[in-house]
Image (tube, coloured by chain):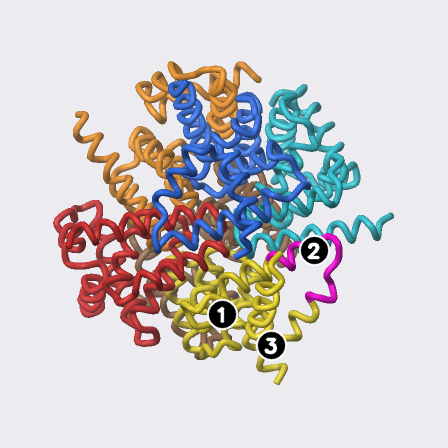
Chain colours: A orange, B brown, C red, D yellow, E blue, F cyan
Amino acid sequence: MDQNMFEKGMKIRRATLGDAYVDKALTQVDDFTKDLQELVTTYCWGEIWGREGLPPKTRSMINLAMISALNRPHELALHVRGAINNGLSRDEIKEVLLQAGIYCGVPAMVDSFRIAREVLSQIDADK
Amino acid sequence: MDQNMFEKGMKIRRATLGDAYVDKALTQVDDFTKDLQELVTTYCWGEIWGREGLPPKTRSMINLAMISALNRPHELALHVRGAINNGLSRDEIKEVLLQAGIYCGVPAMVDSFRIAREVLSQIDADK
Amino acid sequence: MDQNMFEKGMKIRRATLGDAYVDKALTQVDDFTKDLQELVTTYCWGEIWGREGLPPKTRSMINLAMISALNRPHELALHVRGAINNGLSRDEIKEVLLQAGIYCGVPAMVDSFRIAREVLSQIDADK
Amino acid sequence: MDQNMFEKGMKIRRATLGDAYVDKALTQVDDFTKDLQELVTTYCWGEIWGREGLPPKTRSMINLAMISALNRPHELALHVRGAINNGLSRDEIKEVLLQAGIYCGVPAMVDSFRIAREVLSQIDADK
Amino acid sequence: MDQNMFEKGMKIRRATLGDAYVDKALTQVDDFTKDLQELVTTYCWGEIWGREGLPPKTRSMINLAMISALNRPHELALHVRGAINNGLSRDEIKEVLLQAGIYCGVPAMVDSFRIAREVLSQIDADK
Amino acid sequence: MDQNMFEKGMKIRRATLGDAYVDKALTQVDDFTKDLQELVTTYCWGEIWGREGLPPKTRSMINLAMISALNRPHELALHVRGAINNGLSRDEIKEVLLQAGIYCGVPAMVDSFRIAREVLSQIDADK
């Protein structure tokens, strides 16, 4: 494992998902999940999110659409929060999910809006 | 069917996919595909792509990632061409597909790069 | 948005999913979900369900199988209720899900039966 | 393997997919594919298609939508032919694919219409 | 239904998923789920798991990866328990899920580890 | 990029997919695909296949099932060849695909057998 890339990834992961989430994830690391944590931090957050070719805001937009297509509600909720942290407005989140809906179909559209709405309500409640 | 929305959609569809492709699609319209053509042009290209909330270049980026996730090679090829028409550089296409690959998995990453590369070679050959 | 098509869609949506569900959905409409609601009602319920080519009962059967394949449990639950409203017997729901299971695989089959069974139990409990 | 169920399945498979297709499949059976052929004929065509709960025409409609969702072009082509053999009109095939498109998304809709159109053209050419 | 194959399947199902789970499933059998239970026990557990070509431990490894790809959390949880019953160590489960993650993408990897970890914690708590 | 991990991955990739395939892939590397090649070799072949927790033969079995589930025919063909190189017999490939079929559904089962059969015939023809 490339330690520099791991640390680079950890910074971007924290900036996107928030310290609260990442701290909680790290305290839960055990023998079963240690390799997973290192791999995702290094390759996904370091090697990919760490590339200069696209700004974090654009990467967040791409993720919202793509994770809607992949049908992964837990990850979508995380990345709605990440999208807000990376500077998307609620209207921009809405635009991405409407476009995702037309390409992924009505059930995906309805599911993604429900999940996004819950996260946005939690963010409001936490203020 | 809302005629204004259909015409708005047709303009955006032509600007993105190119007149050559759309003209060919229209000459092939018959009883079996007429409703499909109207529906896709009006709802997908008019109602969604016609919204002002995101620029066409961003919509193209989202589509490349999302259609990689959806595993639809024909549509991906179309939208690689559309991405070029909407102003993405080849480096930006590469960035989107690398990000799609980490979230959709290695087989999706390899497939999407192969398809994109073929389309970019055809564009070069057509010059 | 075509107002006539929206209203046509709203009638069919209410007839299929029930007034209780639709009323609840409408009271929750806000800036974030308004466009979604209009799009789904007009495009899905008006333009597609509103076509004369297939009776609602057949459309419900198709949806049960297709939403099993798409792996969307929330939407499947809604459409089990819709299937009953559109005149499917429990035996017909069972037949559709068995066929879906053979084509979508054992995990889809088991998931869809569990979801359908819960909805049918709720319907019994609400009587 | 239940020999009666195998034979029951073979009859229904022939009636749906046509003798020409099934004869060709059977001549290609070898050690690698023999168990596959027996399993699919017995389990899918015998146990499921052989049930009395739904007429073959309805089963064909369900399959067109479901296989569109599953994104399996070879199988979709087979079942477009099967749908014609089981009495669906071209307009009914169109209705099913439009509904599938709204629930599975635009790329699925476009792909399924392209495949269905090719099969219908081949059927016309073979007359 | 082939009664011998059903009984053979039931034995393997019990050995893999555990008597507690299967007994509970059987007490819940009703008119709606009876055919499902028979079909899955006979074809999946009897015809496939009952084949001699692969040991149960290998079949469990394959299932963990495949059900991760299919995105079916309920079934994945069952088969994590089944994997332990069929002799996989926790390290082997980890290996399979890491490989699944690289081919199915980061959201699948994170989801599958979360589900597996919960099941393993329950197993520890039940001791 | 970790050079040692890249080289470790390249060795395993060559041992699994064969020198002919990898040499061809490497001669086609250009600006567009260079990062893809490095990422897949390092991350997938080095970090995952390079782990000691599972033998290559087991990893090949897992891949055949998982790539069937992911519906990626090009990658499946590659990994049928890889499975032979890693010591699977044709009977073992058949067992894996039958199990994949029961969990992924009939269209996946039929597609995967067709693809595997073509690759096995090519291997015979190349002898």
What's the residue type where badge 1 is placed? Ala
What's the residue type where badge 3 is placed? Gln
What is the quadrant of residue F84 in the picture?
top right
Q: Is residue D97 visible?
A: yes
How many labels were placed on the picture? Answer: 3
Q: Earlier in the sequence, mark 2 or mark 3?
A: 2
Q: Which residue is mark 2?
A: D33
Distance from disc 2 to disc 3, alpha carbons, whole Å, reads 27 Å
Given the image, what chain letter belongs to the residue carrying mark 2?
D
Residue C96 % position (x, y): 40, 61
Distance from disc 3 to disc 1, alpha carbons, whole Å, reads 19 Å
Magenta segment: D25-39
What's the residue type where badge 2 is placed? Thr
Is circle 3 on the same chain as circle 1? no
Q: Which is the main secondary structure of the residues drawn in magenta?
A: helix
Q: Residue at x 55, y 64 (%)?
A: D45
Given the image, what chain letter belongs to the residue carrying mark 1?
B
Q: Give whichever of A101, C52 is nearer the camera.
A: C52
Residue F60 % position (x, y): 67, 36
Residue A58 vertical placement versus F48 (above, below): below
Q: Bin the neighbour count of mark 2 within 10 Å (Cα to Cα): few under 14, some 14-19, many 20 and up.
A: some
What is the quadrant of residue D16 in the picture?
bottom right
Distance from disc 1 to disc 2, alpha carbons, whole Å, reads 39 Å
